[in-house]
């Protein structure tokens, strides 16, 4: 199985934010560290934000940060939200496959087992594992040369009860 460029850079965004923990990371800085376009990173950011892996902070001193601790974000979490298709062969999609062996071939079952093993391994590894494996990550990403910007504390808002619907007075 080959992961897309989107998944590769989604993992890199998360690694950057985890390495820069306690501070907000800015897309221009991440783009510069990986020599990739900011527009490309903004596109990748959307599913990460929608699935709670990344939070955005708006404003002049805004940026992005992890949506939860790095040791709680598995590689499977990232792959699940960034990959569109896990079909390893045409027969994975039985609606469009026109193979006469679709119902009697063992290939589909073997490939599904392999894909399951792949997902199991990805679930065992976290973003924290990836950055721990390389102790000089801050230097490699150029983070040590940036001016520190403290991350605002996360705000936990209590949900307000929905307003009761009342019939208008007559």
Image: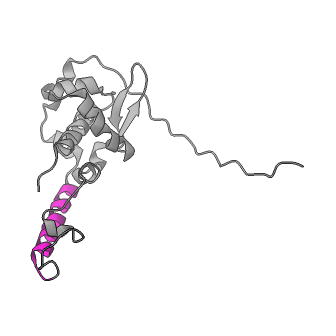
Q: Quadrant of the N terminus?
A: bottom left
Colour convention of the picture: one colour
Residue for point 21% across, 71% down: 94
Residue 110 included in the magenta stretch of the image: yes
Q: In percent of the image, x 20 and y 21: which residue is there?
A: 144
Q: Residue furthest bottom?
A: 104
The residue closer to the viewer here, 106 or 90, is 90
Say whether residue 45 is magenta. no
Residue sitting at x 30%, y 33%? 42
Q: Where residue 91 sits: x, y (%)? A: 15, 70
Quarter holding residue 80: bottom left
- Kindly indicate the quadrant of the structure image that contains residue 86: bottom left
Residue 54 spot, x, y in % from top left:
34, 39
Relative image position of residue 63 (x, y in whole percent): 35, 27
Quadrant of the rendered image containing residue 137: top left
Q: Name the residue rendered at 17%, 41% in the picture.
A: 132
Residue 165 in the figure: left or right of residue 110: right
Total numbered circles: 0
Q: Position of residue 23 (x, y in %)?
A: 33, 27
Q: Which residues are magenta?
A: 104-124
Q: Of helix, strand and loop, which mostly describes the magenta segment?
A: helix
**Furthest-right residue in view?**
170
């Amino acid at each position: 199985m080959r992961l897309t460029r989107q998944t590769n850079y989604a993992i890199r965004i998360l690694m950057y934010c985890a390495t820069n923990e306690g501070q907000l990371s800015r897309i221009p800085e991440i783009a510069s560290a990986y020599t990739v376009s900011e527009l490309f990173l903004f596109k990748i950011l959307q599913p990460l934000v929608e699935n709670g892996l990344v939070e955005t902070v708006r404003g002049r001193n805004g940026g992005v940060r992890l949506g939860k601790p790095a040791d709680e974000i598995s590689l499977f979490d990232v792959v699940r939200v960034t990959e569109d298709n896990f079909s390893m062969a045409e027969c994975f999609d039985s609606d469009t496959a026109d193979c006469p062996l679709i119902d009697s071939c063992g290939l589909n079952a073997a490939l599904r087992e392999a894909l399951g093993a792949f997902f199991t391994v990805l679930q065992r590894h976290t973003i924290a594992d990836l950055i721990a494996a390389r102790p000089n990550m801050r230097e490699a990403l150029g983070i040590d040369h940036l001016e520190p910007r403290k991350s605002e504390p996360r705000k936990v808002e209590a949900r307000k009860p929905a307003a009761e619907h009342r019939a208008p007075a007559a």
